[in-house]
Amino acid sequence: MTQISVFDGHNDLLLALWRSNDLDGSSFISGRDKGHIDLPRCKAGNLSGGFFAVFVPAATVAPESFWSRHPELVQGDIKKNKHKRSDNLLNTAPISQAYAYVATIEMMDIAHQLAKQHSDKVQICTNINNIEKGIEDKKIALLLHIEGAEAISADLHELEVLYDKGLRSIGPVWSRKNIFAEGVNFTFPSTPDQGSGLTEVGKELVRFCNKKQILIDLSHLNEAGFWEIANMSDMPLIATHSNVHDLCPSPRNLTALQLAAIAESNGIVGLNFGIGFLHFEGKRDRFLSLDTMCRHLDALLEVLGEEGVALGSDFDGIEVSDHIADCSGLPNLITAMKKNGFDDKLIKKICSENWLQFIKKTLS
Ligand SMILES: [Zn+2]
């Protein structure tokens, strides 16, 4: 088995643990009987760490236990729709700031519980020094990210609290509208050119993140918002988990012009493993060939160069090919990359070095 390790641009483990009421993350340590990520499988697949997202789903998707812990939040739409519980993670209905904030804190606290109770196995990281040290000590390095900034209100004051809890990366939107910007939907085929750009508060958020050294992730953002951030942000552009629109015309993927703008800023795109974001007809083909993932990598490399391409699996948030199945299958992707002519030096850059170099440049 290959020993090349992976530092991944995006996963939804914390959401999965929260939804299964595992508030201290113990099933991550012992092993989960479902999902894509746990410690035994990280070890098997050489997943050394990555961006661990906090994503707050539609209120109907939150576990019943959440509302029991927070009866004060059960009012208005939540009260009316409580009986409509569902597992539809793709529900793009807006969510309230009060619900989003409490759920975000709970998910971040799962990460903190893990790091506290299993300090020899898990570490929350905020810069390259503690990431490299964590990896050296064989701990899983968690860089905390929020996917959709609904937890933050217009005066941005929650950002300080979240920063103090280790937050270092923000996607202003998931695939729904909020007070900052608009996200793309999942219609296939379609373009990301849908909806309006950043609001004034959205621009404030970008300026604040630049000042505070919080990364801004463009995945899920619509084109109008993308171009505004491209024009105003001081930082190189990143899309942590998006693919190539020319090869799979999902609005979640990046057009040739967007890729060129990311390249020009010396930014990075992380390859999303979601089969629906890879297949040229958007088919959720469980047996999707890993060669298809290599074709997306080829196209990204052509525009972004060897330092601009990384991975952003989206594990625990999407369906992956059975040829990978979960994070223990990462070596299969590496084998496919070798078969497709990628040399070890390039594979190491894509699998971890590019994200680590980027973090070194941008987070102090
Ligand atoms: Zn996502």
Image (cartoon, helix red, strand yellow):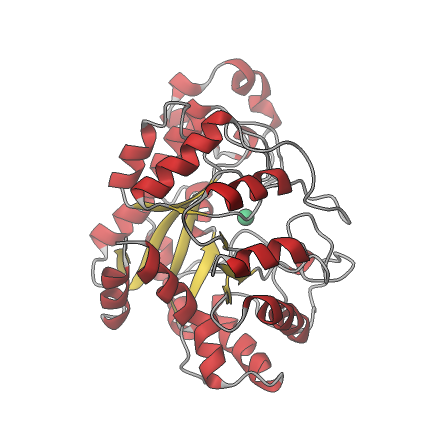
Q: Is residue 53 left or right of residue 182?
A: left
Q: How many marks?
A: 0
Farthest residue, direction top: 76
- Give the camera-side residue of 178 and 138: 178
Mark yes or no: residue 313 visible: no
In percent of width and height, residue 25 lies at: 34, 50
**Image point 38% across, 24% down: which residue?**
70
| Residue drawn where x is 58% and y is 45% of the image | 220
Visible residue check, residue 307: yes
Residue 269 vertical position relative to residue 66 in the rendered view, above or below: below
Give the quadrant of residue 296.
bottom right
Taking depth in this image into account, of 172 and 227 the one nearest to the observer is 227
Q: Nearer the viewer, residue 57 or 166?
A: 166
Quadrant hosting residue 120 = bottom left
Q: Looking at the figure, which quarter contains the C terminus?
A: bottom left
Where residue 280 appears, as percent x and y from the top left, is 76, 62
**Quick check: 107 above or below 98?**
below
- Residue 269: horizontal and vertical position, in percent? 53, 60
Residue 37 drawn at (x, y percent):
45, 60
Occupied quadrant, residue 163: top left
Is 334 above or below relative to 362?
below
Q: Residue at x 50, y 77 (%)?
A: 331
